[in-house]
Image (tube, coloured by chain):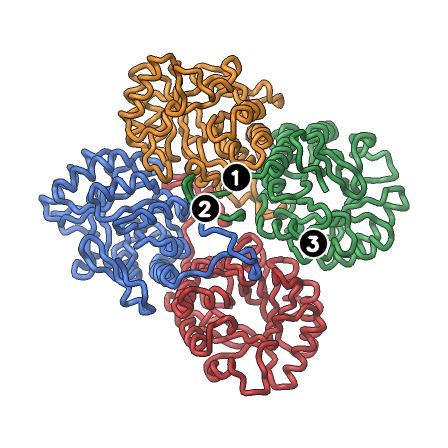
Chain colours: A blue, B red, C orange, D green
Amino acid sequence: MTNTNTNDPSEDTWELAGRTLRSRLIVGTGKYADGPETKACLAASGAEIVTVALRRVDLKAKDNLLSWIDRERYTLLPNTAGCYTAEDAIRTLRLARELGIADLVKLEVIGDPKTLLPDNEETLEAAKILIDEGFVVLPYCTDDPIVCRKLQDLGCAAVMPLAAPIGSGLGIRNPHNLALIIEQATVPVIVDAGVGTASDAAVAMELGCQGVLMNTAIAHAKRPVQMAEAMRLGILAGRQAFLAGRMPRRMHAHASSPTIGLIE
Amino acid sequence: MTNTNTNDPSEDTWELAGRTLRSRLIVGTGKYADGPETKACLAASGAEIVTVALRRVDLKAKDNLLSWIDRERYTLLPNTAGCYTAEDAIRTLRLARELGIADLVKLEVIGDPKTLLPDNEETLEAAKILIDEGFVVLPYCTDDPIVCRKLQDLGCAAVMPLAAPIGSGLGIRNPHNLALIIEQATVPVIVDAGVGTASDAAVAMELGCQGVLMNTAIAHAKRPVQMAEAMRLGILAGRQAFLAGRMPRRMHAHASSPTIGLIE
Amino acid sequence: MTNTNTNDPSEDTWELAGRTLRSRLIVGTGKYADGPETKACLAASGAEIVTVALRRVDLKAKDNLLSWIDRERYTLLPNTAGCYTAEDAIRTLRLARELGIADLVKLEVIGDPKTLLPDNEETLEAAKILIDEGFVVLPYCTDDPIVCRKLQDLGCAAVMPLAAPIGSGLGIRNPHNLALIIEQATVPVIVDAGVGTASDAAVAMELGCQGVLMNTAIAHAKRPVQMAEAMRLGILAGRQAFLAGRMPRRMHAHASSPTIGLIE
Amino acid sequence: MTNTNTNDPSEDTWELAGRTLRSRLIVGTGKYADGPETKACLAASGAEIVTVALRRVDLKAKDNLLSWIDRERYTLLPNTAGCYTAEDAIRTLRLARELGIADLVKLEVIGDPKTLLPDNEETLEAAKILIDEGFVVLPYCTDDPIVCRKLQDLGCAAVMPLAAPIGSGLGIRNPHNLALIIEQATVPVIVDAGVGTASDAAVAMELGCQGVLMNTAIAHAKRPVQMAEAMRLGILAGRQAFLAGRMPRRMHAHASSPTIGLIE
């Protein structure tokens, strides 16, 4: 799927739903202080795709948020943040389509207003119907290999397992699950939610993910624009390290064989 | 000590023994397949300082290894790899000085040929004598806050605690110790040895280290030149994230207060 | 739910589906070398409940496995290991009920023959129907707080999230998820699968679980009977530590406040 | 050194400085609320050896603390807590010997009043002199394999590396270092300081340590006597698990070979 024999990052592209992308960082547009900060963070991140919560924007009005996003530069990925049932998410997306959004959407069905963890059961149900209706679905889900396999079997264009709860900044809680998901994946695996700092993003890429989606880690850093730049670099670093093929872990240099596994 | 209020990485310099440096990555010159690979890896790493084992080079001869290192571009940091006593390290450095090396040296006194772990006791003894003789000493040591404080009190120009044993690739085994070392540091803290991949380098920088020194992680990657580039990016990513100030860790977005500490 | 103000372990009982239990360790009966080893391990574990795979035993015949389990001493918990759909699990349990098993059952719907990870979607569907039919359902599931909440809302008598994949011995991969599950639980939380050694069992109890279910960690230890004893002790140790209330984590003794959270 | 082929914990003894011991838990006597709590915690812990800070007790007077310790039941292990130099520790022990303490002592030379981390350099110097003077020395040190090897080469009767700083409750910060120390040990390895809860003690024993020494984890638990019991059980659990030989870690049950190492 990707060019793996290169040292030139500019040639390392990937495919998502028919688009050829260079950036592996997808960023959210919520939680920033204001429009100029939003604009500066998107630019510093190098993102080519940005998500927008359908519940938060007024697609008909000359919305404040959208006016800060250069539509020539960024592909908008509308998401269903704030939906708690398959029905709710489906209705929101149908309405948005009537108002002119494109088919590529991020499906997010939340199971709990406190933790904001996804409801995989409702997500599976919604994905099935939305794909039947011609949407190109990128679903947010837990790091559950069985759910990810079902979502890709339904025809989702990617799977987007979380690293940790939305807004937690806890980083990749279960790299073992991500490794199982990546091993079986036939579509891109994009880590969505829970990343807290640049090394978390690098770890996701080193595990073999195709991309990372984040919002709070940038927006709630002390200096959001600088963190957007750090995340851009962290994604590149992790991706290059993955392509480079890391040395094996050993107890020490003179250990006769690598005795320590890839997963900690 | 460093410019912390910038978003322009080119302005983020640091001081080591009177030198102003831009790169925070110091690389070793051993373990590469050949001269051209050495040269390419050094270039890709962006390093400004490279270490050379005095035991492995012939300073008088037109040495193969040294011929691949552009002396205009890189500051050579001779090290005492292979020395097992203070006496041995001191003798090696005195001899090298007679043959023309500069005063800036990496002091390495090994305690065990199997694990290659440092002998802090001998290192402290050697550092004291070498500093008295005018050397500018950068000592390799364990991640022991008491030893690091003693080394800086002796007048070492930096402290270089390990992340894990040389050649292990295990990454930062004890971030808690590194945090204690950084908290008390009056000289740069450079993580030396044990880094395995780009995210490890990023983590070191996010903890607040001033630099990272590595060799095997680059030389023993499947594609060393690409890993050198990954490490360059990982250091930049971690440094920018440190300057940006990461979001607090929380159980979830709606946790009333950050309940999860900085150290895992 | 449990007596928390005691130092006498014999008074620390818990309730599961109307039964008052002393032991918090539930063990499987598969994977042992032979009948005598099975019998000795069950005895050493101190378990009061043991699981039996319906697919592996012949309930009508004088089965070899069952003949080694003292029915006066142990409550049998039939499970649906090997079932891959809700329909399959339901049919298996209906048939078993006709042949005389009691209502208390462990529901296990597997999603993948390789990882043996549970299929939560099918598990939820099966749980709903089985509870309607009068079964008392203990469901095996992933460590997903939303799924666990749904299972308890359906009327399951406990929730049994995994620590790691069946037979992996990886221990508790995501203590953060378990903490969220325990925080919301209205029924006992029993960690099921993935425990590898005694400290893993202790950690589960220290997090606040009511019990642990395991099989491979005992059966595939070098000395299974001794590991059964170790697990019995590990469960007791973790439970007592939970009741005792651990000291806070701090950077060091003189840190002015605990700065390191409960979850690592 | 120990009986490894048994399932009867009462037969699993170990040797420390010529004594045959059953309990592998050594406890401190500081930080308790009062004498009765001290007495109850010592009893619940099952310890056979208890440490006493020479700086805190008045060996000549009918000291309050000592009056709560049954000298028939417990071997007193005087320690040099509060000493910051080799000279200070040596003087303290010489004086105590004149006042009648036995030869078995815990050597503790602190390097920093804030972190209470040991000063290995001073500890090595003091150990050498004290052993020459006939003391049987159990030295507190960092988890540094080179220092531990030197201490055992000097003739120490055990090595006592820390798990984490005194009073931190952080548990075993660097199991990799402990594994290296145990691998080379010719004397018992006793983890000293940093344990926070019962599973930490179990982990130490599972790594192959011979014993664990603790104080704050018991004294600063909400219910100290119950935590003392939890620690007693945790040590037994970990020891039995070590003797039983744990199953290998695998990605999942059907992984063709164990791919995940012993050290995390």
List the residue tagged with mark 1: D247
- Tag 3, which secondary structure? helix
Answer whether labels 3 and 1 touch (C-beta < 8 Å).
Answer: no
Is there any visible trace of residue A50 in the rendered image? yes
For marks 2 and 3, the one nearer the N-term is: 3
Q: Residue B51 appears at what percent x and percent y?
A: 54, 74
Looking at the rendered structure, the kind of residue marked 1 is Met
Pointer 1 local density, CA inside 10 Å: few below 14, some 14–19, many at least 20: many
At x 17% / y 50%, what residue is drawn? A63
Circle 2 marks a residue in which chain? D
Disc 2 to disc 3, how far (Cα)?
Answer: 34 Å
For marks 1 and 2, the one nearer the N-term is: 1
Looking at the rendered structure, the kind of residue marked 2 is Ser
Q: Residue furthest right?
A: D98
Label drawn at residue D257: 2
- Tag 2, which secondary structure? loop
Q: Are marks 2 and 3 on the same chain?
A: yes
Nearest to the eye among marks 2 and 3: give it: 2
List the residue tagged with mark 3: D148
Q: Nearer the viewer, residue A16 or D74?
A: A16
Nearest to the eye among marks 1 and 2: give it: 2
